[in-house]
Image (cartoon, rainbow, N blue to C red):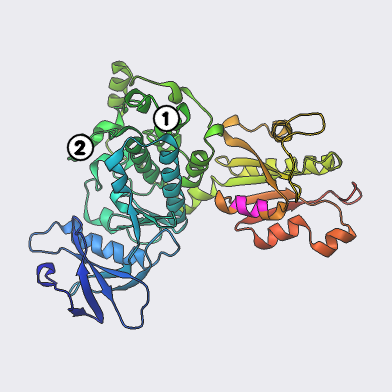
């Protein structure tokens, strides 16, 4: 199909071309309509001219295979596709704003950088849970819908963990967009979802500083420099960047993927809770590594990545975000001990897990002042101290545990909303003894089990151990 000969009003397999959109690097785009279809649609037509880069042809096949298997709010809805005689993909037209437009006013305020980053991270986590690694994440491939949800587009270079990797089979050289390619991609490893976190780190760096951390390298040989040359610390370029944001950005940009966040959900969690980001030496750096350190890293840089012994689903399963919903009432001490035992077991099975310790501070229907108790002490602060005291028995690393007190007059709804908002994978909570009122209204744990967007473990005291029911 010759894109230059297309014109408005033309019909292709039942789709009417309404008007052209801005072209991409390897495709043209048209708004289209079809009788009986009420969603806005766009037709993507790859540019397969004589002598065209073969990546265009393979990328069309890859995107057609992958997009048809994706669903949810973070990807365009797939509608139809043509073949190589008449190649096209029809998908939902996503109304919104490309992240590329934000580059016109960089550097952005830290809070805005974190907000955009968290939205993209949630979209990546949803993509990874569908067995896909994007591998070409960049500002122009992210659209923020009008409701704020991030949508990922352009899956021509992507990899599906359960499908043949056509890009790896057809091309031996690294593939991607130079400034955003991860070190493992340079080494021809296309199977690690943390490659997308590296690319997101580049986006965060750019939004926060107005510069790309590795410039704009054009060739594979130039890409290799990121295996040994660390970027200028963001705070050196923009002193308004807080330490917590530099910590997050530089962690995303680590050469070794095991030193980055384990999952996109864990990255999003830190971006949403900057006050609880565990700071390391990364946070205060103002200089790049010394020349001797860089030289030794250059000597050790591998030529190719070692064989993969992991699956995408396996990596995600090993790094869940676990939520412990903790009852801090004095009469629930026995239940808290049982809950700690259950949480220890969960963390032992997932070395990369993050733990969010959550307590619901029940707010009265008519609020006068819930910030202090009768003695004038901050109730919120007291609860945080109590949560930290409870967590000491877990013997978990400080950078794996965060603490949250949520005010709500509906504890079950608060737990469910928090789990949904922060992509919690597993909730562990206690259930107190029965009572006539609890049987009538339904217990908090029963509501959470019924409505939570993740798995839930409910801990009860062993038979024979009792405590007052509330």
The picture places residue 161, in percent across and down from the top left corner, at 40, 57
Q: In the displayed structure, would residue 455 be above or below residue 278? A: below
Q: In the displayed structure, would residue 457 be above or below residue 239? A: below
The picture places residue 126, in percent across and down from the top left corner, at 46, 55
The picture places residue 282, in percent across and down from the top left corner, at 43, 25
Q: Please name whichever residue, 311 or 466, is drawn nearer the observer in this view of the structure.
A: 466
Residue 246: assigned label: 1
The picture places residue 392, in percent across and down from the top left corner, at 70, 30
> In the rendered view, does 419 fall on the left or right side of 99?
right
Residue 417 within the segment the image draws in magenta: yes
The quadrant of the image that shows the N terminus is: bottom left
Rounded to the nearest angstrom, the CA distance separating label 2 from label 1 is 23 Å
Range of residues picked out in magenta: 414-419
Q: Secondary structure at mark 2?
A: loop
Q: Secondary structure at mark 1?
A: helix
* Residue holding disc 2: 217
- The answer to which quarter of the image holds residue 326 is top right
């Amino acid at each position: 199909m010759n894109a230059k000969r297309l014109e408005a009003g033309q019909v292709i397999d039942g789709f009417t071309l309404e008007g052209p959109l801005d072209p991409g690097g390897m495709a043209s785009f048209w708004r289209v309509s079809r009788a009986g279809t009420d969603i806005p649609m766009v037709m993507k037509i790859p540019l397969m001219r004589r002598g065209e880069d073969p990546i265009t042809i393979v990328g069309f096949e890859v995107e057609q295979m992958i997009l048809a298997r994706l669903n949810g709010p973070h990807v365009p809805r797939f509608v139809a596709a043509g073949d190589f005689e008449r190649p096209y993909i029809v998908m939902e037209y996503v109304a919104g704003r490309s992240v590329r437009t934000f580059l016109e006013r960089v550097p952005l305020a830290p809070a805005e950088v974190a907000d955009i980053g968290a939205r993209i991270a949630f979209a990546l986590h949803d993509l990874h849970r569908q067995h896909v690694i994007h591998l070409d994440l960049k500002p122009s491939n992210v659209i923020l819908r009008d409701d704020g949800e991030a949508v990922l587009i352009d899956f021509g270079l992507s990899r599906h963990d359960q499908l043949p990797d056509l890009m790896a089979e057809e091309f031996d050289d690294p593939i991607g967009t130079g400034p955003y390619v991860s070190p493992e991609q340079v080494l021809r490893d296309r199977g690690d979802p943390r490659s997308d976190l590296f690319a997101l780190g580049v986006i965060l760096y750019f939004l926060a500083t107005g510069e790309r951390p590795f410039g704009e390298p054009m060739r594979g040989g130039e890409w290799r420099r990121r295996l040994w040359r660390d970027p200028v610390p963001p705070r050196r370029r923009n002193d308004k960047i807080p330490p917590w944001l530099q910590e997050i950005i530089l962690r995303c940009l680590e050469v070794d993927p095991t030193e980055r966040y384990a999952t996109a959900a864990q990255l999003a969690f830190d971006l949403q809770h900057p006050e609880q980001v565990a700071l390391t030496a990364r946070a205060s750096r103002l200089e790049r590594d010394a020349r001797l350190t860089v030289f030794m890293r250059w000597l050790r840089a591998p030529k190719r990545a070692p064989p993969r012994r992991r699956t995408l689903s396996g990596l995600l399963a090993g790094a869940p975000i676990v939520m412990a919903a903790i009852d801090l009432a004095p009469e629930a001490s026995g239940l808290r001990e049982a809950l700690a035992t259950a949480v220890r077991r969960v963390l032992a099975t997932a070395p990369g897990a993050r733990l969010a310790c959550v307590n619901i501070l029940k707010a009265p229907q008519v609020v006068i002042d819930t910030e202090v108790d009768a003695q004038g002490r901050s109730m919120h602060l007291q609860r945080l101290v109590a949560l930290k005291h409870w967590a000491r028995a877990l013997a978990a690393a400080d950078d794996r545990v965060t603490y949250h007190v949520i005010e709500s007059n509906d504890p079950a709804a608060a737990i469910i909303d928090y789990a949904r908002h922060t992509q919690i994978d597993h909730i562990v909570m206690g259930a107190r003894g029965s009572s006539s009122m609890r049987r009538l209204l339904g217990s908090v744990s029963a509501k959470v089990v019924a409505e939570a967007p993740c798995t839930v473990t409910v801990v009860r005291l062993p038979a024979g151990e009792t405590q007052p029911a509330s």
